[in-house]
Image (spheres, grey):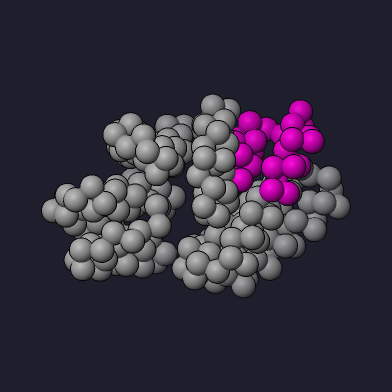
Amino acid sequence: MDDRIEQKLIKAGDLREQEQFGESAKLYTECLIESLEKQDYSAQIHALCGQSLVYKIHARGTNLQTYKNLTLAFAKEALDIFEKNQDHIDPRTQSIALSSYADALYADGKASDALPYFEKSLAVSPAPDPEKGRLKAHIGGVKYLLGDKQNGINLINEGLAMIRTGDMTAYNIRVWETGALNSLAKIYAIEGDKEKAESVIQESLSIATTHNLSIRKRDAEDILQKISENRTDFSL
C-alpha cells in the first residue's frame, strides 16, 4: 500500500473515533479515489471498510435503514474487490474485507449470513492474538444470538482473554476490550443475572471513561441505564 494513502487512512480512522464523522468520511473518500487511480486494491478495501464503519456507527445510534444499507453497500464493494483480486491482497486485508462484510450483515439483522464470513475472517487472519480475540468475541456474540448460547458466551470470554494479552495502553485494544465487555453485559442481563451484568458494564464504563473512548462510553451508559430499568431490549 502507498505510504501516503496509508497515513491518510490512519488519520481517517482517528477522526472517526473522535466522532468527526464528516471529516472522516471525506478523507476515506479521498483515499478511495487515489487508490482507484493507483489500482491499489488493499487501500481500496481499507477505505471502503472504514467508510462502512462510519455508517455502521450511525446505524447503531439511529436504527435507520438507510445507514444500514450504506454500511452494507460499502462493505460489499470491499468484499467484491477482495474476491476479484485475492492474489494481489495481503492476508490481513483479506481478513478485514471479510469481517467488515460480516459486520455489515450483522448490523442489518442477518446474523446467520454473517457467521461464516466472521469465521473465514478469523481463519485467514495473520494478526496477533488481540486482534484475533476481537474476531472470536464477534463470533461468540453471533452464536449466542443464533441459539448456541453457552458456546457463544465461552467464545466471547476467550476472545476477551486474547484481547487482554495485548498492550493495554493501546487505544484499539481498549476499544476491543470494551466491545467484548459490552456484549457480555447485555447477555448476562438477558440471561437474568443482573448483578453480573451491572458489574461487567461498570467495568466497561470505567475503562471507556479513563481512556476517552467516547463511542464505547455512550454505549456503556445506554446499556447500564437499560439494566437498571430491568430492560433487555438490547441490540446484540
Given residues 134 and 225, the one toward you in this image is: 225
Residue found at x 51% / y 52%:
109
Q: Is residue 21 in sight in this rendering?
A: yes
Q: How many marks?
A: 0
Q: Return the x and y of residue 135 as percentages of the image width and height.
A: 46, 38
* Farthest residue, direction front: 147
Residue found at x 48% / y 63%:
60
* Farthest residue, direction right: 37
41 to the left or right of 90? right
For the N terminus, the image quarter is top right
31 to the left or right of 110? right
* Farthest residue, direction left: 195
Q: Return the x and y of residue 8 as percentages of the image width and height.
A: 66, 58
Query: Is-magenta flag for residue 83?
Result: yes
Given residues 176 and 9, the one toward you in this image is: 176
Q: Return the x and y of residue 210 as percentages of the image width and height.
A: 28, 62
Given residues 220 and 150, the one toward you in this image is: 150
Q: Is residue 7 in sight in this rendering?
A: no
**Image quadrant where residue 211 sits:** bottom left
Query: Is-magenta flag for residue 210?
Result: no
Residue found at x 42% / y 40%:
146
Determine the main secondary structure of the stretch shown in magenta.
helix
Residue found at x 68% / y 68%:
26
Classify 59 as above or below 42. below
Segment tinted magenta in the rendering: 76-101
